[in-house]
Image (cartoon, rainbow, N blue to C red):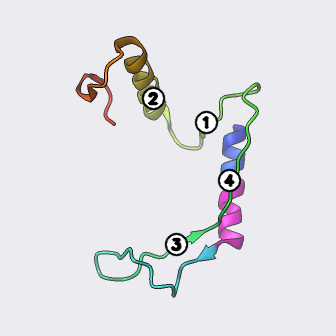
Amino acid sequence: MTQADEQFIKTCKEIIENGYSSKGTNVRTRWDDGEEANYVSIVGVQNKYDVGKEFPMITLRNNTKTFKNAIDEILWIWQKKSNKVSELNSHI
């Protein structure tokens, strides 16, 4: 488990235990049936990573495609020096 995974899990637990609920605040977002799409959130989360130890990437789910697409986009910008998204091999 990476540093990013540990901090992500810690933040999720903090949201569940101490998060602010939007229930009863008349949120604008609605589900298809008209019900409010409420949420639970916290404000001011900061994560710090020691990139000298490891790259801060969440590995709890399969990020293979996401990571490959990010590298593909970086190489596209660096090698082709283009702004034409149609030349990009991966989908944005």
Q: Nearer the viewer, residue 23 or 3?
A: 23
Q: Earlier in the sequence, mark 2 or mark 1?
A: 1
Q: Is residue 24 magenta?
A: no
- Cα gap from disc 4 to disc 2, whole angstroms: 23 Å
The mark lying in front, picked from 4 and 2, is 2
- Residue sticking out furthest to the top: 79
| For residue 61, above or below residue 17 | above
Which residue in the structure is indicated by mark 4? 9
Mark sitting on residue 39: 3
Q: Earlier in the sequence, mark 4 or mark 1?
A: 4
On the image, the x and y values in percent for residue 87 come to 25, 22
- Quadrant showing the C terminus: top left
Q: CB of mark 4 within 8 Å of CB of mark 2?
A: no
Q: Nearer the viewer, residue 64 or 28?
A: 28
Element carrying mark 1: loop
The mark lying in front, picked from 4 and 3, is 3
The residue at 51%/88% (across/down) is 24
Instruction: Specify the amino acid type for callout 1.
Output: Met
Apparent side of residue 71 relative to residue 88 in the rendered image (left or right): right
- Cα gap from disc 2 to disc 3, whole angstroms: 29 Å
What range is drawn magenta here?
A: 10-19
Q: Earlier in the sequence, mark 4 or mark 3?
A: 4
Instruction: Specify the amino acid type for callout 4.
Output: Ile
Which residue in the structure is indicated by mark 2? 70
On the image, the x and y values in percent for residue 63 come to 50, 36
Which residue in the structure is indicated by mark 1? 57
The tally of labels here is: 4
What secondary structure characterizes most of the magenta part? Answer: helix
- Quadrant showing the N terminus: top right
Instruction: Specify the amino acid type for callout 3.
Output: Tyr
